[in-house]
Amino acid sequence: MASTTAVTPSSSLGSDDKGRFSRLRPWPMALLLGWLAQAVLRVLLGIQHAVPLLIPDESGYLLAARLLSGGAAADLSGRTFYQGGYPLLIAPAYWFSDDPQSVYRLALGINAFVGAALLPLAYVVFRRMDLPRGKAYLLAHVTALLPSAVYYSQFVLTDAVLPVLVLGWLLLLHRWLDGGGRLHGFAAGAAVAFVFSMHSRGIILLLVHLCLLAVVAVRRLRPARGEVPAMAAVTVVGAGAGWLLNAWLQRRIYPAGVAPLGEWLSDRLTSWDGLAWTLSVATGQLWHASVATFGVTGVGLVTLTAVVLRRAVRPQDRLLAATTVAAVAGVALATSAALPAEGTVANLAYGRYLACLTPALFIVGLVVLTHVRKELAARAGRAAAGLTLVAGAVVHLHAGERLYRDFFGVFDFVEISFITANWDSLSLDQATLTTVAVIGLAVLAAGRARRRAWMTVLAAGCVAAELAIAGLTVVKVSAPWGRVLAFATDLRPAGLRPDDRVGVYYPGLHWRIWVSQAYQVPTKLIPMDLHRAEWLDPRVTLVVVPWTAGTETERTWPAAPPGWRPVTSNVNHAGNWVAWRHVAKALPAAVNGSPAPLAPR
């Protein structure tokens, strides 16, 4: 984006300079105000949350952030390992408060302001693709309001910030390949190294980045000698620092080991059944990415694939397109191979893992539908419609009866539930056909004589649909499930205090409950035994035990030492529990109300 390089008195400007300055000055302000508006929208959507909802993911990141900020460790042994890059970003939330709810909302605020950076980044990308400022600004808002980008900003997850980092990485690579200085290359290496420290998807992006550097070196696309080795060194050093951070976190929070995702990955990639699963689920991810963005992401993906295959395209553009396509394929395949079979519909078509690459594909799709020749837009639209239909058929064949029998988690299909007006199950065929129809409508608009007017109407429709999805996901998904989880795990009725040390009897207590409570407790949970009083740590001031239906609360801890009694009980779908406290420190008993289901994950 062009900008003035110095501020001079208006009297010293010529008439041409004055006109140019007056034309350029509003755009930085428009970007700033747009970024703030996007951030405020995300804050308003997430402010109603009080506790982590997507368990154990959110709790894992929050507990790691607590440790990085100087707080107590936790023990999540046996769970999925939640890496340290993202907790490092949200750790400052613990500098301002020790209250778990306040920390959670501060972390969501960090998400909001980082995630809103999609707007200026998308604007820069559109401008580099030769779109005029007005159209670039409008389409940047459409991109920043992508349902997945806005939805995941409501949770303490890497997916709230990964789209910004990945788009920034690709933009920096494009600038470097297009003649930019070394600083762009070094920044791209640092960005992908940070992504590597945040999530296992970063391994794929790091490998793709290093392969790109190797191709640039072999084909001598950069004339400066030693530049590519220097970029590789920056990338490797940054990735090494992230590896050391994660190794330290794993020793502190997962002392007995983590869930064996690597074993699942190797098993899936070395057997015919595993390969069939991997390819089918990866296709389901592509289907989800296309349908959840009204087909625009599908248009972007087929366009980039065509760019890779065309020899007439500049080598730099082909290389960047190949980088993006390889990242999409690598992430889809690797995450599908490592995805545990949990008996859910999300196992068949999951959208979260490709969400970090969705904005880049979406931007390309928007440019094709609004800016390139009508014939090319029509061909890309037809190819995207075919991709969506084929992917939907593969998902249908692979899923079979599981599509209707397995557990449907609406929090995994918010965009598709909106498109099909079905919040209780996945309407795969309806979603597929609706997406194909929307692609056809966009192609027809691209062929109209008054293309700009039609595309403005479609863009406005996209914004309206995106805002509607954002509002409905709060009403139908995050708010009700958040209330359920808060009810099921809240220790405040037990009089939880900052100086409490909480003992937990893990056998019989659902992991969603104790993982959520581990975040509420300011110190590490202490294991205890229901039947051996001598195993009670003398530092413990509050005890949480499972509660079998029909058992009196006073009998839930058979070996309770003298002076201890129940102070609160909780009946919920995942598992009932009772909290005990010493009578000398106990508060009046409080028993929660009617049973309620716990948000499954």
Image (spheres, grey):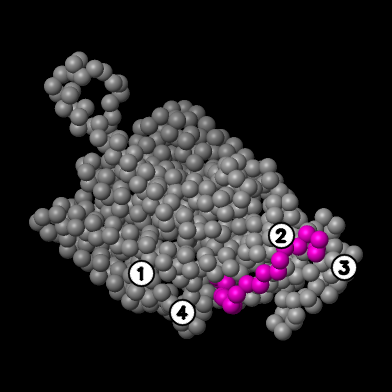
N-terminal of the pair, mark 4 or mark 3, is: 4
Q: Which residue carries the number 3 mark?
A: 562
Q: Are marks 4 and 3 in contact (CB under 8 Å)?
A: no
Q: Which residue carries the number 2 mark?
A: 77
| Image x and y of residue 42, in percent | 41, 52
Quick one: label 2, few (<14), some, or many (20+) residues within 10 Å? some
Quick one: label 4, few (<14), some, or many (20+) residues within 10 Å? many
Q: In the depicted view, which residue is nearer to us: 111 or 251? A: 111
* Mark identifier at residue 418: 1
| Image x and y of residue 537, in percent | 84, 59
Q: Nearer the viewer, mark 2 or mark 3?
A: 3
Q: Nearer the viewer, mark 4 or mark 3?
A: 3
Range of residues picked out in magenta? 582-601
Q: Quadrant where the N terminus lies?
A: top left
Residue drawn at x 60%, y 41% as measured from the top left: 95
Quadrant of the image occupied by residue 70: top right
The residues tagged by marks 1 and 4 sit, at their Cα atoms, a distance apart of: 18 Å
